[in-house]
Structures are given as C-alpha cells and as structure tokens.
Image (spheres, helix red, strand yellow):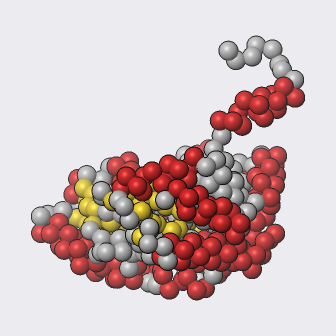
Amino acid sequence: MAPEQPEKFSEVLYDLDEVVMDGLTHWQSPGWFGYFPANASFPSILGELASAGLGQQGMLWSTSPASTEIESRVLDWLVDLLGLPPEWKTTGPGGGVIQMSASDSTHTALVVARHLASRSAGIDSLVAYTSEQAHSSIEKGARVAGYQHLRLIEVDDVYAMSPPALETAMSEDLDDGLTPAFIGSAVGTTGTTAVDPVRRIGEIAKEFEVWHHVDAAYAGSAMICPEFRHLQDGVELADSYTFNPHKWMFTNFDCSVFYVRDRSPLIDTLSILPPYLRDQVSESGQVIDYRDWHVPLGRRFRALKLWFVLRSYGAEGIRHHIRQHVALARDLEQRLADDDRFELIAPTPFALVSFRHVDGNDATENLGTAINASGHSYVTPSKIGDLAFIRVSIGQTHTEHRHLDRLWSVIDRAA
Ligand SMILES: Cc1ncc(COP(=O)(O)O)c(C=O)c1O
C-alpha cells in the first residue's frame, strides 16, 4: 500500500539498502562483462545531480539558453574529439543533439528518411535496409515509423553487411516498384561488434539517393582514440550517426548523441510551431531550438554531465581508460586463442570478446551459467543462428587486470 502519511527519509533509505539493493543487477561492478557497458563516473553523477537541482527545461533556446549552448558546444567538441566530419557541427550545416537512447536516434533518422522519400513516393512503397546483425532498434524504429518493408541483408563470415547483397536487394525492390528510403549500417554490431563497410554502403546510398544512418551506439566512443577511426572510414558520406556516451564514455545513462550532416531535413520533418512555442529569438533564426530535433518537446539538461565528464577526464583520460579496456580484451582473446578448449567466433576490434567451448552448444551454455553463478563476474550467453557463444564485454569504469584474472579463473575451472 502506498503510504498515507509522510515517512522519515531515513526509513526510506533503510529500505533502499535492505530491500531494494538485493534486487538490483550490479552494472557498475568491475566484474560486469554483460551486454555492453552502461558505465558511469563521479563527475557524471555530479552532473546528473546538478542537472536535477537546476531543474532546467530546455525545449526552446529561450527556455534555457545556457543548456542549449552547452549541449551544442559539447557535441561540437565531440566532433573534433572523435574525428567526425567538421560539417556535422552546429556551427556548420549539421549538428548534434542528445537523445535518450540510440533507439530514439535511429527512429528519428528513419522518420526523416521517410519524410524525404515520401515526397515522391507512396509511404506504402518505402523500404528500409539493414544487416541481419543490426540491432533490433532498427526494426522497431522502422515499425514505429510506419515502414511496410524492411530487408535484413546477409552478412559475410565476420558478420559485416554484404554490399553486393545490399545492391541486389535495392535493385530488385526498384524493379518491383518499391522505393528504397533508408539504410542503417553498424560500426560495432551488438552480437559481435562487427563493422559494416561504411564507405561502400555510403556510396550505394548516394547512388540510390537514400538516407544512410550509421549506428555506432557502442563503438562510437572508441573513436576518441585515432587508431580506431579507420573502422568507420567513409563516415563523412553518412546522413546521420548515433553513439552512446552512456555505454562507454563514463557518462551515466541516459545520454545518446545523434548527429546529422545537414540539420534542415531534420527540422523540416519535426518542426511544428503552435503559437505558444513561438518567440522572437527563435524567429530570428540565430538560435537552436532542440525541440525540433527529436520527438519529445520537454528536455532536461543532459549535456551537463557530459560537459562535467569531458572537462574532468580530459580527452586523454578517456582515451586512457578505453585503451585499457581494449588491452584487457586483447589479453583475454589471446588466452582463449592459446587454449584448445575454446574458439573465438569473431574478431575483437574493440573490447568485446566472443568465444565458445569447442565441445559445442551445451558446453558453452553450461560455461556461461557457471560464470554467472560465480557471483563476481557476469557475461552474456548469446547465439547467432544455432551457434551458442559467450560475449565478454569489457568496459566498466573500474575494471582492471585483476578482475579479468578473476573471470579467467572461473572460465578455466568451469570449462
Ligand atoms: C549497436 C546498437 N545499437 C543500438 C542499441 C540500442 O541502444 P539504446 O539502449 O541506447 O537504445 C544498442 C544497445 O546495446 C546497440 O548495441
């Protein structure tokens, strides 16, 4: 029963410790190797607290000028820090906006693509394309955006989208009177962090005049280290791009970044201007009103925590941690490769290691269960088709070598 009378706050906190904590999953533990990380940091938590205390509502520039300006500034910084095309800055034709999740960013891209393509074709004829390994948010976004046709394009032996298969599917659809409207490619798929050939897909998108969205939800953070940028070669051809600081940039959930190469189609698609939202500053055309950049109108000051993180760590600090996670992943990959009991099922371009037990699916599933029963380490048992495997995702803020050793000891014992 909900309390009728006010309770002491100490009692509420007591229940948080004694009742709720036991029911939580410890994503912030250094032994967390599940899914992708949703890491956090002290500056980010302070930024979240400050944002809650300041209670800003930045739907229009004028309803919170500083929160809009900081958001634009921080996302422009990230364009430079991640080596993204300079025209994606808000000072250029493009720009970035913070959304709740990569699913929201991808949904927005699908809606803009639909808006553009439906100027010359019926909505029923529009087709969206992505790979069989793409995140389910593309399928969900396409459904919500009203696409009647979604093609899941086959992948090669390292789970990256096949450009010839994409071209064939698009040509066949055109022959059948359908209209290709959207391609979603991935830099770092959820299953195994496979990397689609972004440049070739971007060229195909240009040939067919369709919107190309790049989903780098997890791997985008790694681009702060120049040595990973070749993996998204051709990104300048993309129309939009998303990555999640709330996965691997020490910024607590929620914080997903969405960039567009040109902000005009986005604003044309989403801007609706009732009288109560009009004001002189907006009409001057000199400012950004982020309400036009996504579905929600109201928006909180999410940029503050990212600003706190970037300033407190510095780019060098973030690079240091990301490189450390990648080095730990390479260490684990090597241990597995050197051991006859295991096989790697995919390359490790970032910090996710995908492996299985050579004795087959049952042995692999039993191993996953044993690791997760350890109480100190947690991994994600998964499948591609009928192939069972284990995903070890290294990216929690405080994961160190000793945590990897602890994980290895249970793998070694249970295999
Ligand atoms: C490649 C990829 N895209 C999209 C998503 C969805 O992210 P979000 O939870 O921010 O919607 C994920 C989640 O893990 C992902 O791995």
Question: In this picture, is 142 found above or below 285?
Answer: above
Coordinates of residue 153 in the picture (x, y in percent) = 27, 67
Coordinates of residue 79 in the picture (x, y in percent) = 62, 77
Q: Nearer the viewer, residue 53 or 233?
A: 233
Task: Answer yes or no: is residue 244 visible.
Answer: no
Question: In this picture, is 96 found above or below 20?
Answer: below
Please identify the quarter of the rendering in which residue 287 is found. bottom right
Q: Nearer the viewer, residue 355 or 55?
A: 355
As drawn, is 54 to the left or to the right of 248?
Answer: right
Question: In this picture, is 393 found above or below 19?
Answer: below
Please identify the quarter of the rendering in which residue 137 is found. bottom left
Q: Please name the residue shown 87% across and 29% down the image.
A: 10
Coordinates of residue 168 in the picture (x, y in percent) = 19, 74
Q: Please name the residue shown 61% across and 62% down the image.
A: 409
Quarter of the N terminus within the rendering: top right
Q: Please name the residue shown 25% across and 73% down the image.
A: 166
Q: Please name the residue shown 52% across and 56% down the image.
A: 414
Residue farthest along the left direction in this orientation: 176
Coordinates of residue 15 in the picture (x, y in percent) = 77, 28
